[in-house]
Amino acid sequence: MTDIKIDWHQRAKTLKIDGRAFINGKRVNAVGGQTFECFSPIDSRKLTDVTSCQAADIDLAVLAARTAFNDRCWAGLSPRERKQTMIRFADLILENKEELALLETLDMGKPITASLNGDVNSAANTLRWFGEAIDKVYDEIAPTADNTLAMITREPIGVVGAIVPWNYPILMACWKIAPALVTGNSVVLKPSEKSPLTALRLGDLALEAGIPAGVLNVVPGFGAEAGTPLAMHMDVDCIAFTGSTGVGKKIQIMAGQSNLKRAWCELGGKSPNIVFADCKDLDKAATASAGSVFYNQGESCNAPSRLLVERSIKDEFVKKLLSHLPEYHPGDPLDADTTMGALVDCGQMQNVLKYISSGKAQGAKLLAGGEQTRSETGGFYVSPTVFDHVTNDMTIASEEIFGPVLSIITFDTEEEAIRIANDTEYGLAAAVWTQDISRAHMVARRLRAGTVHVNSYDEDDITVPFGGYKQSGNGRDKSLHALEKYTELKTTWIKLT
Ligand code: NAD
């Protein structure tokens, strides 16, 4: 639990923030001196100037990564040695937990308790889990003829470019760098320009843990100026991207236009959450439905933003759901009791408000929220918003809003629920609430989504893969399956006689 004695406002006043890039083991300015200003969405206060990396800086970072890879100073270590360093890296994150949580909250606007007990802990756990796993993964011998030996081994792919979004900055970075580093790759990490600060600290802590200079580089900057040169780079072997579907499509084109680097994309979602009338515990379903869609201000790729409810229980269920809304009233993100913070910036708040207007204009019924709050703070807050009488073709039901907005859609039959759930370009997550075990299995099988929850929404563990069907992307983060993205398979034939 959070130490409620911490005065986070006081800590914020004395926090020293270094916004310089981290290349080849050192904090550096851009070659051309470019910077951008980093503001807090909590109150629009300027936090620091951040290095704005350009193509020349990306070249330097890729060169450092390639040199370290070719030196084999990291790739040449035994898995056990890499494991020990990754565990030290995870320990350092926990030793610096309060600083990292504060940076995350100031930079991105999420509540300090979520940063401290959720994001930073999960980031450390990700590094530790992949570290601990890597000396337990075996290669293969193929069943070939008696006079041959055919070995199938996994090798690091080389230089990995990782481009990540702003919604879970430190965690998304660790979902990429942990499996990439444990398998012996060098990494150039580009955080979002909207929340670069914790990723930069990861560079310092990796070096302190013993990861050699050049193996992990962090290059803050804008998508077109820093992300594109990384995705187009001829000496990057793999690009691991998390972000919007629109940019993901561009990343795949860039991979094809350059050196056909491997391009893995974890993209957006518009996840359906189906509540059948035979759901055993409607209270539990209502608690989880509200908690999952409003967590992180609704800025979660897998947020269950389409609630599909069977008509016979609709009124009762909606009443239960609405009773949870006061729990998510936006508050000061630096107050340990706050459960909903600020949206990441003014642009994101305007997008969300635009979607709310479109919901009203297209005939959905606003049941709650729908407006900016706490404007006197200078920050960007939107109250938890619920629309009823939504049809799946409305913009609020078909496009990813990435804010605290829930659309309620009513259905009459199981077949109709499955059809509506799958009627989306996305396929990241879904949920089914029912006490009929056959229905649970049958519906789960027919939902086109990378993760299906039954009688829950918020289950999560590093041991299971995370990623999407359809335009929610390809490849998977987390679990041992993530190692496949960062390794090449090599077959080595040995003639014995
Ligand atoms: P975004 O696509 O705008 O940006 C993501 C990253 O790509 C940022 O670092 C950005 O600077 C960079 N970028 C932007 N344009 C680029 C370009 N032309 N070339 C190279 N890089 C470029 O996404 P966002 O707004 O930062 O994040 C929100 C999106 O991320 C949502 O769609 C959300 O669903 C998705 N997301 C998905 C997952 C998942 O695991 N599937 C997890 C978190 C977020």
Image (spheres, rainbow, N blue to C red):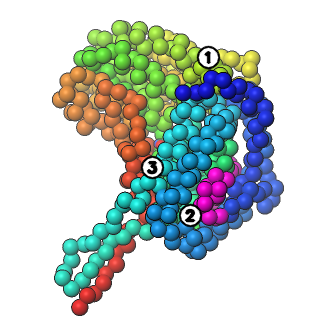
Could you say whether the residue bearing mark 3 is in a helix, strand or loop?
helix
Please report the bounds of the magenta region as a residue range: 204-230
Tag 3 or tag 1, which sits nearer the N-term?
Answer: 3
Quadrant holding the N terminus? top right
Q: Is residue 120 magenta?
A: no
Is disc 1 placed on a helix, strand or loop? loop
- Above or below residue 397? Residue 227 is below
Residue 129 image label: 3
Few, some or many residues within 10 Å of mark 1 (<14, 14–19, 20+)? some
Would you say the beta carbon of the disc 1 residue lies within 8 angstroms of ligand 1? Answer: no
* Disc 2 to disc 3, C-alpha distance: 19 Å
Q: Residue, x 43% and y 69% (percent of image)?
A: 155
Which amino acid type is marked by label 3?
Answer: Trp
2 or 1: mark nearer the eye: 2
Between the residue at mark 2 and the residue at mark 1, the CA separation in whole angstroms equals 45 Å
Q: In the rendering, at what x and y percent does residue 124 appear?
A: 53, 45
Give the labeled residue for mark 1.
371
If you read the primary sequence from the N terminus, does the residue marked by circle 2 or circle 1 appear first? 2
Residue 337 falls left or right of residue 309 = right
Query: Residue 377 location, x and y as percent?
Result: 74, 20
Asked whether the viewer can see residue 245, the reply is no
> Which residue corresponds to the image point at 68% horizontal and 44% vertical from the top-left?
197
**Rendering coords of residue 339 (x, y %):** 56, 22
Numbered mark located on residue 186 in the image: 2
Q: Residue at x 26, y 80 (%)?
A: 149
Look at label 1 and name its amino acid: Glu
